[in-house]
Image (cartoon, coloured by chain):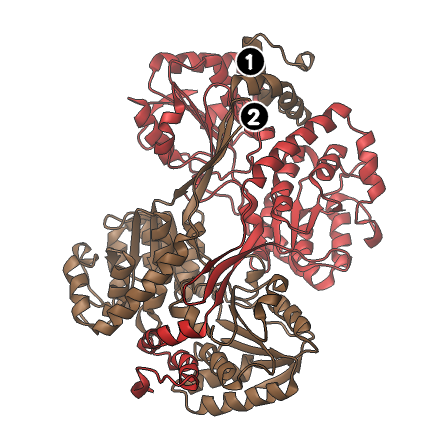
Chain colours: A red, B brown
Amino acid sequence: MKIVKAQDFDLRREVEYGSPEQNEAVRKIVADIKKEGDAALLRYTEKFDGMKLEAASLRVTQEELHAAYEQVEPSFVEAISAAADNIRAFHMKQKRNSWMDLQPDGSLLGQVIRPLHRVGVYVPGGKAAYPSSVLMNVIPAQVAGVPEIVMVTPPATGGKAGIDPYILVAAAEAGVNEIYRVGGAQAIAALAYGTESIAPVDKICGPGNIYVALAKREVFGAVDIDSIAGPSEIAVLADDSADPVYVAADLLSQAEHDEMASAILVTPSEQFAKACQAEVQRQLAELPRRDIAGASIEQYGAVILVGTIEEGIEVINRLAPEHFELIVDNPMGYLASIRNAGAIFLGPYSSEPVGDYFAGPNHIIPTNGTARFSSPVEVDDFIKKSSLIYYSKEALLSNGDTIMELARREGLEGHARAIEVRLLKEGKAGANDDNK
Amino acid sequence: MKIVKAQDFDLRREVEYGSPEQNEAVRKIVADIKKEGDAALLRYTEKFDGMKLEAASLRVTQEELHAAYEQVEPSFVEAISAAADNIRAFHMKQKRNSWMDLQPDGSLLGQVIRPLHRVGVYVPGGKAAYPSSVLMNVIPAQVAGVPEIVMVTPPATGGKAGIDPYILVAAAEAGVNEIYRVGGAQAIAALAYGTESIAPVDKICGPGNIYVALAKREVFGAVDIDSIAGPSEIAVLADDSADPVYVAADLLSQAEHDEMASAILVTPSEQFAKACQAEVQRQLAELPRRDIAGASIEQYGAVILVGTIEEGIEVINRLAPEHFELIVDNPMGYLASIRNAGAIFLGPYSSEPVGDYFAGPNHIIPTNGTARFSSPVEVDDFIKKSSLIYYSKEALLSNGDTIMELARREGLEGHARAIEVRLLKEGKAGANDDNK
């Protein structure tokens, strides 16, 4: 883990958009599903997942869902259920009501806030299938009030039911009961355009491989999509008051995700930097995923030395990391100066896995510097708003002339006349009537 | 204006993504600006706008901004200022505070809500330059608290200052004072990546031609962008209680925007349908923009006959129109059943231009069926949130075992150990210590 200066260090990496061949393959899959529906969906599922299914067996049955509970440890059910409770409680605080503003002239203006009607959640298969991510994608939609939440996940090439029981239990605990065993670009296309067996959705979210990501980009517009996550990142700003053992463990917890993951320590103390550097090496040697974590630390890990904690905060603001731990005395005192960070963990006991699994805030957080302008997944991602305008006769009579002036200034006489016909009918000619 | 049945009528149209040549041209412009900065910006401005500028003259001066006030009518300044007040008042109601939830175990969880730091607003040149759109893009950003709002707009090929004084006055009234006379894909690239003269922004919004739209897509990821608007739409649901003169005028006010604009009447009354049809023809003949409005009505206009108002609402929900006027008795009584509409105008005096110019809600509204999952422009488009997690020692000690169980279930031992090193230090070994 190298020690570097703050200048010109930038977390941002070029985003992978797939090869022309991958793009072409995805476009063909999407077009085939749009045109042929279930027939194409079953064909691609056989081709890519090695599962020969019929339309009637695409959907996971209630029996299979119940059976999943028999295949997992009771302690897992308890843990995932406790996590689900915390995540639900936190997201409930994000709920907002429709509102109206009542004007003295009798008009009403407002925003009508409604959930999306139907949302699709993609859950990857194999090793990338994380029960915690099922909760983090589904619960905000559920709290938003989305009446139909549907999950798709590729069937494993091995077993018959073909879906990890831990994923099924997480889905059930989160409240999903419409689950289809399809994956890849074909599943995304089915969610976007619908097939005979799967009704189309309004929004698709959840992580996936490059084909899934490209398919989401391809169907965007027909449906909404979530943002496409880059490799995971942590930046820790700590001083001598912190424990190098804690900080090293937190850096490694991020590095073990992915060889592309990034773990950065920012500190004003050279002594602390060296202690953490040594501790990372010591803990790394004992880590089961030491090859992945080691490659991540080697390529993307760094210790950035700064003059002061304030200067460290400015480095953080430039990095705009996905996860940010601040382990210094009185961390709350710096909160107002943290401009860019997806999730902020304060103090020695707020280790990142607390947020990854349990505390309640979402663990799907903007990566690659996009915390400058975007937010962790939340209830707001599953609602839409409509403006509400009820104008009284009095309001129109008092403001009609001004509205007509602005419309005519833009050369939109038809807009002015829509007001004018009403003013004329009510016995009040427009002030700009001579422009007619 | 044809009268049709509800079945299979769909407002949605294929979205224009530009020709391969246009895409290629835009990619080259963006790459040149990214590499060469001001030099490329000045070169493209001379090439496309016919203006030979120097870096020092890119920015509109305070003197030019003040001079614009001399070139417009005082009544315009009054009207635009009154509109700005209303828009500001409405958007102020959308503001939200950061919040924290204090837990009994001493933990704090919350969301930190902050404005974006720097936002770029694109304003098209020529006839598409609408002062009202300047207000609608700028004011929500300003209300959100964005400290730096910068406007770009192409210099007209004619004059010296080269920018419509009405646009400059609208910008000043909205509170923008950093304005650059650049347009097209080159302006978008300059905002995204920065040049020597223009600092990069976090988000770009505002309408533009196909080159501007393609450039926004190209830079998305490096910065955030707003959604790309399709042709404007209105759907009116009215019965015999409505005045055909009002309804026809409202339909035409939308149709005059663009030959691609769409104006739809939904009604349970055949008699009312015919009266509106005749009235549209009558008013159309006298409209200055009758060629545009006529083409729009001919191609995309329609009257859809339904059995009941409730059935009409279902047609509206399927259309998910940008603008929706409901002109029936007690329109408020149907509000809860309107699921998909960008802006809802209730009653006979809430003519669409009231919202376009003056009432306060934003006039930038989702088109092409996307009101199913997106919202009018608002303060939320100019903020970002960070999750806040402060976990107490007590909270970590009580929940550490559960967090480790979930981490180990996902095969992420490094995550479990980040918790475990803390539990061990505090004299509490993890329950799953034997898994280590």
Assign a secondary structure to mark 1.
helix
Image position of A271 with respect to B411: above or below: above
The residue singled out by tag 2 in the image is A354
Of discs 2 and 1, which sits in the foreground? 2
- Left or right: where A339 falls relative to A213: left
Do labels 2 and 1 touch, CB within 8 Å? no
Assign a secondary structure to mark 2.
helix
Foreground: B338 or A337? B338
Amino acid type, label 1:
Val
Amino acid type, label 2:
Val
Residue B328 lies, in percent from the top left, at 58, 76
Q: Residue at x 26, y 50 (%)?
A: B198
Is any atom of residue A288 visible in this view? no
For the C terminus of chain B, give its image quadrant.
Answer: top right
Residue A208 lies, in percent from the top left, at 62, 42
Q: Which mark is residue B421?
A: 1
Image position of A55 with respect to B271: above or below: above
Foreground: B126 or B255? B255
Callouts 2 and 1 in the same chain: no
